[in-house]
Image: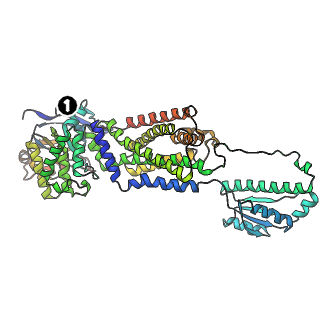
């Protein structure tokens, strides 16, 4: 125990004296938590729309002003021909072109039927897809209004199915509510996984690990001595993040904090095992950095933080399930937003414990005092 | 001087086809200063790592402080001190904190740490620097401190792997005074070096060539045997026979 105490004493002293590390551990995550949820907003707004109006009628004017007043679109220009509008797309000045053919009004009145043409710049797929969908809805609305005017009310109402939505646990579809807990997990992951891996490799790089290896310090003592400080830091970081989420974004956990912290405790053990594993395979900090970076990228993209895991193809779901981060993001969202109880997240607990055992076991096997 | 600190018989280490250490046999007496010489890549460090319990021998036998290098590595580690080519104290800890950490892991009590620490600091004249980060000390001081810390727990044997690399001649001289002090206190010293003047300070020296020990005797006898005026000439005569290229 004395050895372990000496090791912890040394680790904490070193961490708190490292002027480069402290901001990475304590300031950077907070700054990210303050910036990222504001930027990572998937509501598509400010879609730039170029209108090619070949008709110049009352109806086209009504239609365009309806689109403009929807709040989603910004009309960037009116053209009488398609070519200059397309040029706007090429110059990235417009995302979508709405082309209204000549005789639109006449066709609409005489034949009760008219068509418009929508062209979207699909380079930004989300914007194009959502933008077209919004535009469709607005045009459909516009269409209904015209029908209402022309037809007797009864007939117009006939045969339409009206769908009403209700969003549970996040009634206003507040994006922050959804993103903040997820980003919190990611930050704890970066600090825990990255910094712990680099810390151990640093001892390899400067050669102090060799000195440790010739002392009577046991393998488990050294490993536990490295893990406890970063486990504590992970806990502290998460707590600060949770407070920020509460006072900045108004995200107040609905469920049990004890449950949340129990899960975090296990998650951090799994994560530190991962960091340790990377460090046992790396000879220097640069190498560890790139390996850790590779995995953090996978964690970010596959964990369901930005893209729902349910929408992934089945092979990708498997990768997502094999990522410790996925389960924690799941659990944090469930506990914080829904107030889920232990019985609801039993499976995730099991997954996380399995990760903790496998990653740490592997790392300990691979860490050798004697070659 | 009948008791042996290190007994080594046909100790061998292979990495695949490469035989880094090839059947070396030697004894080191208790309290002796034993110089372990050889060109770069001759296998010195590999041999030393095996004796310190950092690496398993492929074949052969060896005991260090009476413990077997295959089975009793942890016992060996409690009874030796080690100082490597790389500076291995923590630069972001103070002189005192390093003494506390390394002394503590060998089981010294707080009281012993205080006493030994004071003694060490006085001996090295580091009173003013005791609270300074080790990283801010000049190299020569660091090396003297590292050596003193390596023997703070009174090990039976201390292994020094090129301890004076890059150190100025005056400091090297002081460093050897520390080594003599340690030997006088009954600590066996096993040291590798590339400085032939340092080799002269040793009681006996061995010279490794291509993983073998080609010469082993006192410096005076070796000079006689090779009909050389200095250890430098002895070393050249042997190292020139090497087939293996230095890294």
Q: Residue A233 at x, y = what percent?
A: 41, 46
Q: Is residue A127 above or below residue B107?
A: below
Count neighbours of disc 1 (C-alpha within 10 A) and say few if under 14, some if 14 to 19, many if 20 or more.
some
Question: Foreground residue, B160 or A97?
Answer: A97
* Quadrant in the rendering for residue B58: top left
Under tag 1, what secondary structure? strand
Q: Residue A186 at x, y = what percent?
A: 51, 47
- Residue at 24% x, 30% y is B72
**Image quarter in which the C terminus of chain A is found:** top left
On the question of residue A246 being in view, the answer is yes
Q: Residue A171 at x, y = what percent?
A: 66, 46
Query: What residue is disc 1 on?
Result: B67
Q: Residue A59 at x, y = what percent?
A: 85, 64
Give the side of residue A356 with respect to residue B85, left or right. Answer: right
Query: Which chain is indicated by disc 1?
Result: B
Question: Foreground residue, B11 or B130?
Answer: B130
How many numbered circles does the render carry? 1
Q: Is residue B56 above or below residue A278?
A: above
**Image quarter in which the N terminus of chain A is found:** top left
């Amino acid at each position: 125990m004395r050895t372990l105490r000496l090791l912890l004493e040394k680790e904490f002293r070193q961490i708190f004296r490292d002027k480069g590390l402290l901001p990475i551990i304590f300031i950077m995550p907070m700054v990210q938590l303050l910036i990222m949820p504001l930027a990572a907003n998937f509501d598509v707004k400010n879609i730039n729309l170029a209108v090619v109006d070949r008709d110049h009628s009352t109806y086209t004017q009504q239609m365009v002003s309806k689109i403009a007043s929807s709040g989603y679109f910004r009309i960037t220009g009116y053209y009488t021909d398609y070519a200059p509008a397309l040029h706007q797309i090429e110059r990235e000045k417009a995302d979508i072109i709405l082309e209204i053919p000549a005789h639109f009004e006449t066709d609409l009145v005489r034949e009760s039927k008219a068509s418009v043409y929508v062209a979207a710049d699909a380079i930004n797929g989300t914007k194009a897809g959502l933008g077209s969908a919004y535009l469709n809805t607005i045009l459909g609305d516009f269409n209904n209004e015209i029908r209402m005017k022309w037809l007797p009310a009864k007939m117009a109402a006939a045969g339409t199915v009206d769908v009403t939505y209700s969003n549970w646990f996040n009634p206003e579809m507040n994006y922050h509510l959804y993103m903040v807990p997820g980003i919190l997990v990611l930050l704890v992951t970066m600090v825990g996984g990255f910094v712990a891996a680099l810390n151990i490799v640093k001892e390899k790089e400067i050669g102090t690990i060799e000195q440790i290896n010739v002392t009577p310090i046991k393998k488990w003592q050294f490993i536990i001595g490295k893990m406890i400080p970063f486990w504590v830091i992970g806990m502290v970081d998460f707590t600060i993040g949770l407070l920020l989420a509460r006072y900045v974004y108004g995200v107040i956990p609905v469920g049990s904090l004890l449950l949340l912290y129990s899960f975090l405790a296990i998650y951090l053990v799994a994560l530190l095992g991962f960091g340790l594993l990377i460090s046992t395979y790396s000879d220097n900090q640069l190498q560890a950095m790139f390996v850790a970076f590779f995995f953090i990228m996978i964690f970010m993209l596959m964990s369901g933080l930005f893209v729902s895991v349910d929408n992934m193809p089945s092979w990708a779901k498997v990768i997502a399930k094999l990522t410790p981060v996925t389960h924690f993001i799941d659990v944090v969202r469930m506990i914080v937003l829904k107030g889920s109880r232990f019985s609801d997240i039993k499976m995730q607990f099991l997954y996380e414990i399995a990760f903790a055992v496998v990653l740490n076991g592997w790392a300990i096997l691979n860490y050798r005092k004697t070659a | 001087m009948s008791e042996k600190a290190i007994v080594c018989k046909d100790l061998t280490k292979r990495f695949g086809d490469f035989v880094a250490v090839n059947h070396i046999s030697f004894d080191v007496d208790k309290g002796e200063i034993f110089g372990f010489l050889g060109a770069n890549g001759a296998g010195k460090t590999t041999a030393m790592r095996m004796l310190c319990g950092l690496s398993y021998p492929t074949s052969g036998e060896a005991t260090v402080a009476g413990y077997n290098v295959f089975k009793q590595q942890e016992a060996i580690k409690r009874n030796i001190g080690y100082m490597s080519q790389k500076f291995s104290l923590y630069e972001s800890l103070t002189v005192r904190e390093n003494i506390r950490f390394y002394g503590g892991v060998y089981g010294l009590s707080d009281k012993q740490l205080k006493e030994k620490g004071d003694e060490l600091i006085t001996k090295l004249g580091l009173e003013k620097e005791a609270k300074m980060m080790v990283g801010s000390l000049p190299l020569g001081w660091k090396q003297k401190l590292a050596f003193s810390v390596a023997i703070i727990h009174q090990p039976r044997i201390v292994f020094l792997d090129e301890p004076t690399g890059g150190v100025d001649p005056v400091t090297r001289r002081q460093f050897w005074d520390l080594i003599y002090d340690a030997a006088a206190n009954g600590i066996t010293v096993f040291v590798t070096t590339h400085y032939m003047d340092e080799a002269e300070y040793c009681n006996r020296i061995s010279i490794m060539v291509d993983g073998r020990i080609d010469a082993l005797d006192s410096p005076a006898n070796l000079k006689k045997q090779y009909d050389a005026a200095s250890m430098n000439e002895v070393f050249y005569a042997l190292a020139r026979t090497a087939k293996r290229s230095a890294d």
